[in-house]
Image: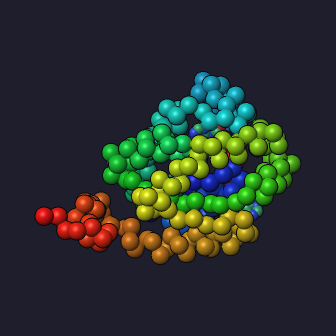
Amino acid sequence: MRVLMVAPPGAGKGTQGALIAAHFDIPHIATGDLLRDHVDRNTPLGQAVKGHLDRGELVPDDVVLGMVREAFVEAKAAGAGYLLDGIPRNMAQARQTYLIARELDMTADVALHLQADDEELVHRLLARAASQGRSDDAEEVIRRRLAVYREVTHPIVSWYAERGILVSVDATRPKEEVGREILTALEVLRSFVNVPEAARRPIDLTSLGVAFGEPPAA
Ligand code: AP5
């Protein structure tokens, strides 16, 4: 199973991502966790991106795309499944992630969209700030992260809808209910997606004009 998530901060990418990864026994690739690990270890990359994280801004695309390529190569060796959490975050990342995955014969089967309104998300992240103290969980930075999501990340949802792989879930309900709905949906899809890449038939819509009410080609 190959799943990527598109969701605003606090919607539950980390929470539900861990559940999905454990259920399907696939690697959980979380760009935010990888970046925070660099910051904690004070690596040159960590020093370069710390300011972006603290301000709630996206780090440069090439930084996260390099991480994803490396993680995909490892995931391929481990069975070719994955759960992507935190990427893609803009249209350029969506296209590049797709191209990297296509090169490795491991494009996503499902794009999982977790939906929640901003007030619920602010409430959750402020509650987490009190217990965990993440550097970007101050209210002003939370609102900046949400604005970045609405502006550059959310528009990619329609791209996945057009590709026919979008699954949307109401993430405002309790974690267990959200998790149950996600796993049920993914289990239904599992039998459809466990098809070897070479056995998949490309869809050529040009031959289906009649189905769209167009006269047959002369
Ligand atoms: P990232 O680590 O991806 O953070 P985020 O998107 O801001 O999301 P969060 O981790 O805050 O929330 P989540 O959706 O994972 O929810 P969670 O399960 O934790 O990115 C951080 C930063 O890294 C970015 O701002 C950017 O700077 C950089 N970055 C990362 N990827 C990048 C990329 N591709 N390109 C450029 N920059 C990138 O839950 C949140 C809280 O809510 C928890 O306390 C949880 O217990 C609670 N909760 C979860 N579900 C529920 C529920 N159903 N009901 C009640 N509470 C719930």
Pinpoint residue 106: horizontal percent, then vertical percent.
37, 53
- Residue at x-position 69% and y-position 50%: 9
Can I make out residue 2 in this image?
Answer: no
- Residue at x-position 82% and y-position 43%: 139
In this picture, residue 190 sits left or right of residue 58:
left
- Residue at x-position 49% and y-position 73%: 187
Display colour scheme: rainbow
Note whether 126 is above or below 36 in the view shown: below
**Quadrant into which the C terminus falls:** bottom left
Can I make out residue 154 in this image?
Answer: yes
Residue furthest out toward the left = 218
Give whichever of 189, 35 is nearer the camera. 189
**Quadrant into which the N terminus falls:** bottom left
Residue furthest out toward the right = 130
In this picture, residue 31 sits left or right of residue 62:
right
Note whether 65 is above or below 159 in the view shown: above
- Residue at x-position 77% and y-position 39%: 141
Q: Quadrant of residue 57?
A: top right
Pinpoint residue 38: horizontal percent, then vertical percent.
62, 33
Pinpoint residue 26: horizontal percent, then vertical percent.
49, 59
Q: In which quarter of the image is residue 138?
A: top right
Pinpoint residue 71: horizontal percent, then vertical percent.
47, 44
